[in-house]
Image (cartoon, rainbow, N blue to C red):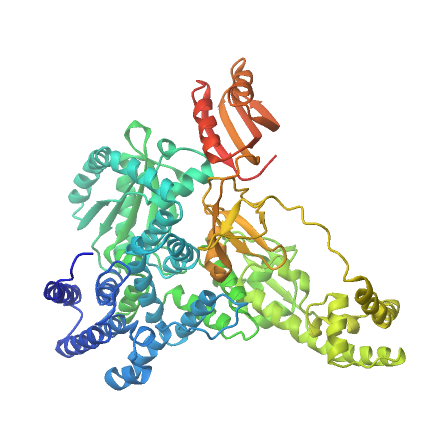
Amino acid sequence: MLPIDLAQEKKEILNRYKSLLRSCAEKINKKDKKEIRKAFDFAVKAHQEMRRKSGEPYIYHPIAVAHIASKEIGLGATSIICSLLHDVVEDTNYSLKDIEREFGKKVAKIIDGLTKIKNVFGKNVSMQAENFRKMLLTLSDDVRVILIKLADRLHNMRTLDAMPVHKKLKIASETLYLYAPLAHRLGLYSIKTELEDLGLKFTKPEIYKAIAEELQATKEERKKYITKFTRPIRIKLKENNLNFSIKGRPKSIFSIRNKMTTKGVNFDHIFDKFAIRIIVNSDLENEKSDCWKIYSIVTDFYKPNPDRLRDWISTPKANGYESLHTTVIGEDGKWVEVQIRSKRMDEIAEKGYAAHWKYKQQGSKENSLDKWIENIRELLENPESNALDFIDDFKLNLYSGEIYIFTPRGDLKVLPKGGTALDFAFSIHTDIGLKCMGIKVNGKLVSLSHQLNSGDQVEVITSNKQRARKDWLRFVITSRAKSKIKSALKEDQKKIAIIGKELAERKLKHLKLKLNNKTETELIRHFETGSSLELYFRFGTGAISNSEIKNFVNLKNRGWYQTIKNKIYGPPKGKANKSSEKVIVFNDDDEVLDYKLAACCNPIPGDLIFGFLTVVDGIKVHRSDCPNSVQLRSNYSYRILKGKWINKNDIDFIATINIKGIDTVGLMNKVTQIISNQMNVNIKSINISSDDGIFEGIITLKIHNVAFLKELTIKLEKIEAISSITRTYKHH
């Protein structure tokens, strides 16, 4: 290890601090500068003995977070101070009171929102979920908490290389699951994009590297094409005396990967890798007409795809995003996405909520982002929801597309894509949702589960006799509707449960059994209700019959017989566990435990894997790139076990491959020759289809390990007519 040059480090810390001051010079006055310096000195002193995993002084991190908050999000002096101090209470001996005494109540409140809570919550709840919920609770007071948290997460992701592999996976999974969607919702598009790309880099490094290399290789080609594409547009815009700038914008690695996956194509077949952004510097009253003027000029030169026009200027997104998007076909048949927006719109798109507030204070129109934050507050105030339910509901509203619905009076309501008629009723008012009897869409009566489309005019028919029903939860998708229905059902359930308990008491008394805590626990176990509320609710509704109660009492009275039998003969022997031989070890001590292979991703030896401790099925082993891994690592990190394979070549595993290509005579014969004769692999099942000259075969094989599968794939790829071979998750 190299010796630490403290003098050099001190110099570097000051250089980074000066860079921070330069990033916010336009936003701060002399008083602010003094307070920022005070916070910087405080943080330096608090963290002076601490170092990051990379070996760097810890103070580099708070300075970097403050720099992101200032430069990339556009936050002011208070946020910069809070960013510098965000880890002081959590990681050092200073308390919140010390912060309040030195920097005031406002700063202390934001720091409190940013400080993680440790060892407070039970083991049955994800710590991260509770931390996330606590962070969002501060939304009621100050949205800056979340913005600083996102800056903190972005810097952690940028410096994740120094972490051990399991930590990388956990943090990257959390980022993809919660933080990237949250950045998207708050309008921080450049931060959202970077978080997604970095999340992919650490969860699927091979895929990330392959796409990044492809993008680098085609960089010059793209640059030349965009220059040529924009030349006539620039000339025409100048002729119209428009003050503009044009930027080439590469598509993110994450979005390319998504397109490749959803469309089932390789990199070369992603057509809209080219994108430009035209930013016009116009007055507030002229910006809409200027954007449409630019659209007209662009489409004079290049034909637009009518299905790809998106007008978010007339109807902004719920997070305040305003822009005009079109996709046009350029030379050589290449599709180019063109984004047109004003300088104000661009700032809001890049800096999200911070910019929104800036322009709001200047008299710009109200933003629907405020309504969204209002909805979140409502969600958070619901005492019934647990942390994980809350996050699931919250996520529903993060990434979903939007539809625009009109009331009979012509008022506009925004719902997530897939929203139902009942979701609409709840979006107007809770009482209207709970009393909803029927819905008219465009004058026609429809079911409550009817999915709405943009432009629908919706009328709600209510009745005081209507009550919330459990089956409503099957089709509503908004978190507001779900939480209100659950609350109403719970209230109704409680009323019935009170009557049910009295009934249970009377019936058991008749059978000479007293209802006490012990009997209640036995009843819950016997009827598998999970809680006393559910138990008495079932009594109250008559779901538990008299004969079932008698059966319970008889079994309870026979219990003494089994106890004596066990003492004489020993306890009943369980069935021998016929689980697979132990080929996976867990944790750092190479512990050998019983496990099952997860059906969602079917791991085989050589795959990167982890163990997940389930409630019912013990340990389930998943592939690291399993479709469910992001959610599991993010929500239940405390249940994750590190897993690795040990050598057991004599055990066969199931793997399924999907082969696509051109249908030629004898193709299938060639494939089976390689599999069975050359590689000596057993085929478990084979499914072939041919349509219009295109061949597709799904073959399930019994193989030893992943290296064997790779070798087989290489040999099959040499067959001329085969265009792609992919491994699938599902076995056929």
**Viewer-nearest residue: 682 or 297:** 682
| Quadrant, the N terminus | bottom left
For the point 27% across and 40% down, the residue is 298
For the point 50% across and 75% down, the residue is 381
For the point 76% across and 81% down, the residue is 516
Position above or below: 321 against 294: below
Residue 218 in view in this figure? no
Furthest residue in direction top, as rendered: 665
Residue 78 lies, in percent from the top left, at 25, 75
Residue 308 in view in this figure? yes
Q: Is residue 120 left or right of residue 502?
A: left
Residue 475 lies, in percent from the top left, at 61, 57
| Quadrant, the C terminus | top right
Q: Is residue 475 left or right of residue 283?
A: right
Furthest residue in direction front, as rendered: 568
Q: Is residue 641 left or right of residue 167?
A: right
**Viewer-nearest residue: 45 or 434:** 45
Residue 438 picture quarter: bottom right
Residue 435 lies, in percent from the top left, at 65, 69
Q: Is residue 276 left or right of residue 433?
A: left
Residue 8 picture quarter: bottom left
Residue 271 picture quarter: top left
Q: How many marks?
A: 0
Position above or below: 180 against 382: above
Residue 313 lies, in percent from the top left, at 35, 54
